Image (spheres, grey):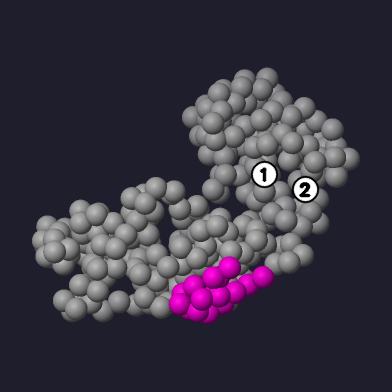
């Protein structure tokens, strides 16, 4: 059996008794970082063989895992923190189990996105979670444009170095929506900053410490958009993107033909 086990996202007391018992009884532990998991096991006074399994070697480890499960061994997989497979490795391990009919289950527990969704103080169901945004400008713009069309809570993981920039990007796409930045979840200095995107941009002039989750509640959009509204959005996008990319993002936001918005973006660029 493969057990995908949730581990603490900050406070070590959040680990469940079931996860502890399974770690103590298993044959081996696959983990995102052997050093970090080694510290957790040491804290629990558990000694097990550790095998690194991260984004760059998950495919090879999946094959090894399949062999171990076929031999009747019990393996636990843990990521560095939280639930494996949710913005963490684990998906390929699950896939190979499904493909080959091998048994696996999930041991529930801490999850940063679920904690943040509730702690944000915003309506938490339904919500859409996008994990960490891509580093490249085009990739970020594509994901943010998709998020902009959603009528419910959206959440992102974000590095403290990019929190303010991401808030500004969201403000440019969505306007001044209700939002929250949740920082250092479950830890001693956990903080929840709630307000609107503009108030949070002002609040985070100084770079925060610790990993953050950004939660935003897009406001309902009118069925039609004025030319002035479209032009304002295009100008904001053109400040950061090429004419082609700005038109593509605006097309997703306003649900209008890309060719039409490309022509308008060219005119505004002059």
| Location of the N terminus (image quadrant) | top right
Dividing the picture into quarters, in which one does residue 27 lie?
top right
Residue 26 can be seen, yes or no: yes
Task: Identify the magenta region.
Answer: 191-206
Q: Nearer the viewer, mark 2 or mark 1?
A: 1
For this view, does 267 lie left or right of residue 148?
A: left
* Mark 1 surroundings within 10 Å by alpha-carbon count, few (fewer than 14), some (14 through 19), many (20 or more): many
* First in residue order: circle 2 vs circle 1: 2
Residue at the location (69% across, 28% down)?
A: 51
- Label at residue 80: 1
Residue on which the image places disc 2: 18
Q: Nearer the viewer, residue 44 or 1?
A: 44
Q: Is residue 215 above or below residue 102?
A: below
Q: Nearer the viewer, residue 266 or 6?
A: 266
Q: Is residue 3 above or below residue 128?
A: above
Dividing the picture into quarters, in which one does residue 13 lie?
bottom right
Are the residues at dot 2 and dot 1 in contact (C-beta closer than 8 Å)?
Answer: no
Residue 235 among those drawn in magenta: no
Residue at the location (51% across, 58% down)?
A: 162
Measured in 3D between alpha carbons, the distance from the residue under mark 2 to the one under mark 1, in whole angstroms, is 18 Å
Residue 54 location, x and y as percent? 59, 34
Residue 75 location, x and y as percent? 70, 32
| Location of the C terminus (image quadrant) | bottom left
Q: Nearer the viewer, residue 226 or 112?
A: 226
Residue at the location (24% across, 59% down)?
A: 246
Residue at the location (50% across, 65% down)?
A: 164
Instruction: Determine the secondary structure under disc 2.
Output: helix
Residue 93 location, x and y as percent? 56, 33
Instruction: Determine the secondary structure under disc 1.
Output: loop
**Residue located farthest toward the right when viewing the structure as drawn:** 45
């Amino acid at each position: 059996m493969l057990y995908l086990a949730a581990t603490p996202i900050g406070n070590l007391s959040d680990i469940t008794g079931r996860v502890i018992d399974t770690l103590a009884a298993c044959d081996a532990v696959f983990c995102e970082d052997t050093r970090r998991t080694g510290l957790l096991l040491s804290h629990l006074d558990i000694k097990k063989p550790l095998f690194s399994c991260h984004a760059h070697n998950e495919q090879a480890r999946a094959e090894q895992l399949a062999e171990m499960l076929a031999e009747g061994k019990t393996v636990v997989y843990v990521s560095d923190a939280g639930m494996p497979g949710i913005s963490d490795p684990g998906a390929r391990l699950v896939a190979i189990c499904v493909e080959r009919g091998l048994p696996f289950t999930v041991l529930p527990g801490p999850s940063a996105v679920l904690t943040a969704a509730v702690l944000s103080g915003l309506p938490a169901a339904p919500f859409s979670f996008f994990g960490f945004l891509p580093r490249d400008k085009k990739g970020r713009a594509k994901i943010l444009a998709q998020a902009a069309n959603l009528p419910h809570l959206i959440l992102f993981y974000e590095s403290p170095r990019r929190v303010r920039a991401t808030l500004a990007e969201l403000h440019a796409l969505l306007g001044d929506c209700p939002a929250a930045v949740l920082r250092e979840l479950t830890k001693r200095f956990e903080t929840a900053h709630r307000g609107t995107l503009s108030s949070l941009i002002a609040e985070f002039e100084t770079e925060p410490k610790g990993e953050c989750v950004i939660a935003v509640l897009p406001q309902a959009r009118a069925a039609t958009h004025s030319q002035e509204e479209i032009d304002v959005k295009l100008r904001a996008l053109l400040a950061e993107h090429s004419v082609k990319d700005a038109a593509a993002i605006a097309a997703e936001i306003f649900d209008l033909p890309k060719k039409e918005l490309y022509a308008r973006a060219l005119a505004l660029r002059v």
